[in-house]
């Protein structure tokens, strides 16, 4: 399968712990996005990368959230000192730049975070 | 700011009947409009988009959507619904400037009964 893959699919953690999610985009895609989806809501944009450059991160929810894409391939999203309000589905998507310009994103199945 | 409203949380139709999922949008400048579908335990899948041109756009699985600028709407339609169309549907918009950020509606759950 050459789609977007995310790992882990489900993470249960205790409040205050750090968690990290990994996303492997479609290999030829140079853009990678992170979204968050809570129950009953649509995906909410968090940040995106073009190659290894993080071009927009103002929508990250707090300074506890950080993302990296060190070699322009896979990306990680880290949440430090998790809070119960962080419980959500974290979605990764990728696109090629022409696709990015017209909005066709390819989404992974998401990583569900549960903070106890 | 850009935003999308999907006024119906749920739509229920009988198989073989027409299906319509409503979406209205707000954006500065020309809108780029999209529909995505999410099946249980699956990632969001792109259905169709409107960028410019013909107001009626056709997409995957027999879906189409009509762009109406005066009503700022982009309703999703299918002439004859299938049970397999039961899923969660999201409308999304972006403006012409920030080509990286899609704003999604809250979603509409479609149930097609046999």
Image (tube, coloured by chain):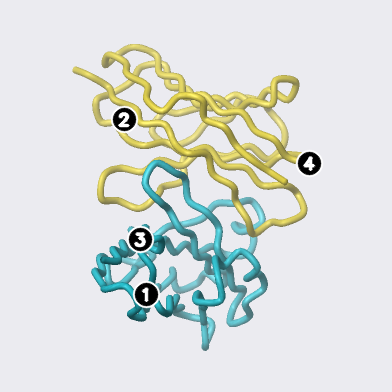
Chain colours: A cyan, B yellow
Q: Residues within 10 Å of mark 4 (few under 14, many from 20)?
A: few
Please give left or right for residue B35 compared with residue B42 in the image.
Answer: right
Residue A90: quarter of image: bottom left
Residue B65's mark? Answer: none
Residue A74 position, x and y percent, is 44, 79
Q: Is residue A51 above or below residue B103?
A: below
Please give left or right for residue A95 compared with residue B28 in the image.
Answer: left
Please give left or right for residue B20 compared with residue A51 in the image.
Answer: left
Picture quarter with the C terminus of chain A: bottom left
Residue B86 position, x and y percent, is 29, 30
Residue B54: quarter of image: top right
Indicate which label's residue lies in the foreground, 2 or 3. 3
- The chain identifier of the residue carrying mark 4 reads B
Residue B85's mark? Answer: 2
Marks 3 and 1, Cα distance to the nearest angstrom? Answer: 13 Å
Does label 1 lie on the same chain as label 2?
no
Q: Is residue A14 above or below residue A85?
A: below
Residue bearing the label numbered 3: A87
Q: Residues within 10 Å of mark 2 (few under 14, many from 20)?
A: some
Residue bearing the label numbered 1: A21
Residue bearing the label numbered 4: B28
Q: Secondary structure at mark 2?
A: helix
- Confirm or deny contact between disc 2 and disc 4 (CB under 8 A): no
Does label 1 lie on the same chain as label 4?
no
- The chain identifier of the residue carrying mark 3 reads A
Q: Secondary structure at mark 4?
A: loop
């Amino acid at each position: 399968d050459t789609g977007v893959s995310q790992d882990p699919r489900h993470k249960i953690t205790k409040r205050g712990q750090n968690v990290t999610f990994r996303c492997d985009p479609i290999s030829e895609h140079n853009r990678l996005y992170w979204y968050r989806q809570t129950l009953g809501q649509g995906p909410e944009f968090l940040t995106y990368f073009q190659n290894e450059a993080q071009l927009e991160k103002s929508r990250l929810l707090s300074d506890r959230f950080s993302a990296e894409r060190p070699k322009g391939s896979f990306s990680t999203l880290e949440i430090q000192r998790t809070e119960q309000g962080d419980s959500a589905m974290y979605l990764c998507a990728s696109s090629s730049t022409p696709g990015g310009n017209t909005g066709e994103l390819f989404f992974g199945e998401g990583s569900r975070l549960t903070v106890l | 700011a850009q935003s999308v409203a999907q006024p119906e949380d749920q739509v229920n139709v009988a198989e073989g009947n027409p299906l319509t999922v409503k979406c209205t949008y707000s954006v500065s400048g020309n809108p780029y409009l999209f529909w995505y579908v999410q099946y249980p335990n699956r990632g969001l899948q792109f259905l169709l988009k409107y960028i410019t041109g013909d107001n009626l756009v056709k997409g995957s699985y027999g879906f189409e959507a009509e762009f109406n600028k005066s009503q700022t709407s982009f309703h999703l339609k299918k002439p004859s619904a299938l049970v397999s169309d039961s899923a969660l549907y999201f409308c999304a918009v972006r403006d012409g400037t920030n080509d990286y950020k899609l704003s999604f509606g809250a979603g509409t759950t479609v149930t097609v009964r046999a």
